[in-house]
Image (cartoon, rainbow, N blue to C red):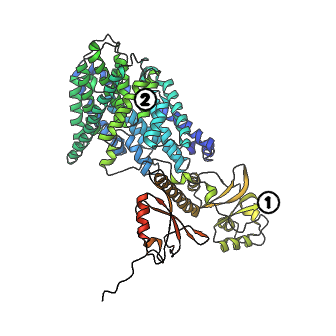
Amino acid sequence: MIEARIPWLSRALRQRGAAAFMAASLGVGVIVGLAAALLVWLTQLLRDVAEGGIDNRTWLVIVSVPIGLLIAWGIAGLAGREVESGGVTETMVGLSLHGGYLPTRTVFAKIAATAATLGSFGSGGREGPIVMIGGTIGSSLARHTRFGEDQIRGLIAAGAGAGIGATFGAPIAGMLFAMEVLLGNFAIRHLNAVVVASVAAAVTTRSIVGEEQLLSAPAHQLGHVMELLLYGVVGLLALAFGYFFLRVLHNASIQSARLAKLPGWVRPIVGGLIVGAVGIWQIDSIGTGQDFVGGLLSLQSDNDALWTTLLLLAVLKIVTNAITRSAGGSAGTMMPSLFIGATLGAALAILVAPAWGFSDIDPGAFAVVGMAATFAAVGRAPLTSILIVFEITGDYGLVLPLMLATSLATVLSERIHPESVYTMPLKQRGIHLLRREDIDLLDTVEVRDVMAWPGTLVHRSMTTTVAQEILEEQHHHGLPVVEDGELLGILTITDIDRSGGPSEERTVGEVMTSNPRTVFASMPVSVAVSRMAALDIGRLPVVADDHPKQFLGMFRRESVVRAYHHALGSATDRSMYRERIKQRTHLGANFYELPIPPMSSAGGRRVQDLTWPEGATLVSVRRGNRVIIPHGSTVLADGDTITSFGSSESRIELAGMLEPAPPDRDDS
């Protein structure tokens, strides 16, 4: 383990402060950058071996792909089936369902399986696998240095973002991918770590493998405002092909499950043969496709490429990637999505260029926009899609076409296919990850709102016998040691037992734990809970923000329950407030007063027993000189005046309800 080999690093990281967390993020970024460089190098090595036969005899690809998929399948059998397929979905499961646990053993297994798959010309990208590799590295480092769960989540996201940043040389896109896809929020406490890791990984990988191994493109510009119409069509094409891609992936996984009764090796062999056969026909439809996409991004207006061939390649890439993944290969869907989008954009540009009279059509520009729109439709990560193109091209000349096509593809794809390529496999397994639309409830409550005063304070000069009696009397396992309002330490029953038990000879100052871990009064309860869990303790002293030694109270396990109810109450109050505002702004709604006449049917009855008109809200009850804020058990009386808020229709209905009850008639 890391801490066993580098003790000083372990001690530094186990402080778990902000500086240690950022240092860990930097370390994760560098390690992920090295892992990404290793994956690139190993993939290229195996590809060179395969290409040696392909250049001379193209049909040999039908041999290399089955062999590569069989090797990847065998590695997954030894290391765990999570090594198969992409890796982003598996990272999401570990992050959300397993407390951030991703087994360390999968790092090298995933590298080897991915290299075997892509190096043998299996169809896919290395982006999904490197996300899992990076997330696992972050998880391992966080667990081995005993960070809290929230920090583990942050380092997993940092490692995953670093993987994307390293693969594309695009750290900003890596950061956005981690926040947008994995975490589902942009919490500041995670954002800084992800940025540091992504930049470190991108710099590390680029310095090792060089620029030529990364996807890049020249700058492009919007030629004429009328071209926006064509870019809108690109968004619609991305929507259609994105939907087709998702359905093919879904059906391929179902067909793969039906082969479960056959020997396991059948799946990679059969799938490899199909992919290899397609590769003999169209070699550009297999492999990563990165070189082919790079060529499309550099297309000029005077090219002679066939748009029909490009559309055919888009369809074949969908098929070969789906088969590669379902056959046991380790390959992602991001690069295939970019490949499909680039071919769609370039094909449309080539098709309409002869008839377009407003400007010279740039196929490379349309390929760039198609990439972003298709990945947005497939991965539901519009911000990542836009930023990754900006970083690849190094230019913002296509900002309007990118925003138009990407937004169009994202919004419409959400309507026709709610699941993304990353959540679709989860749904098939019956897993529904909750995506928070707002921040966590415990993020909304500060420690100061739920801390408690410990009662009798323990002093340094007090004997341990007296201190033991106070602990037993207050039913606490530990109490703060305070003098003149300053926190000196924590005394626990364990401290007393360790010193030989209660004694009139020993003082609290001799056996207490000095310089205890604390929390600030303004700290979110969620952070305090994470710190308490990381330290495996049940209490933390609360100190002032501007004076780290000034004792204010104690944060205990029961404080978490109070915080949760406090947050729920606040959320309910906000919901009720929004409802009141909605009523207040309703046309025709107003406050009005109605007296309860003698012999009213409402007199002597509780508020909760009456059927109030729809749209009427009881505000107050005036009884003589008193104003009562009513609740369900408030009993109304004759002569009371009620104030209500509602529509004119509800006022009429309520007035009728308060009318005196008709007298009983004697019909005899």
- Residue 65 % position (x, y): 27, 30
On screen, 489 above or below 334?
below
- Judging from the image, what secondary structure is the residue with disc 1 in? loop
In the foreground, 327 or 250: 250
- Asked if 438 appears above or below 229 in the picture, the reply is below
The answer to whether one can see residue 162 in this image is no
Q: Residue at x 35, y 28 (%)?
A: 338
Q: Amino acid at mark 1?
A: Asp
Q: Quadrant of residue 467?
A: bottom right
Between residues 590 and 193, which one lies in front from this camera angle? 590
Q: Quadrant of the C terminus?
A: bottom left
Q: Residue flagged by tag 2: what amino acid is it?
A: Ile
* Residue 83 visible in the shown view: yes
Q: Would residue 487 be found to the left or right of residue 119 on screen? A: right
Instruction: Give the answer, above or below, for where 351 lies relative to 562.
Output: above
Q: Nearer the viewer, residue 471 or 434?
A: 434
Tell me the residue that label 1 is attached to.
484
* The disc label shown at residue 386, or none: 2
Question: Nearer the N terminus, badge 2 or badge 1?
Answer: 2
Which residue is found at the position 44% from the left and 42% from the top?
182
Q: Of discs 2 and 1, which sits in the foreground?
A: 2
Per the image, label 2 sits on a secondary structure element best described as helix
Give how far across and how far down residue 528 sits, in percent.
Answer: 59, 54
Whether 497 is drawn above or below 591: the answer is: below
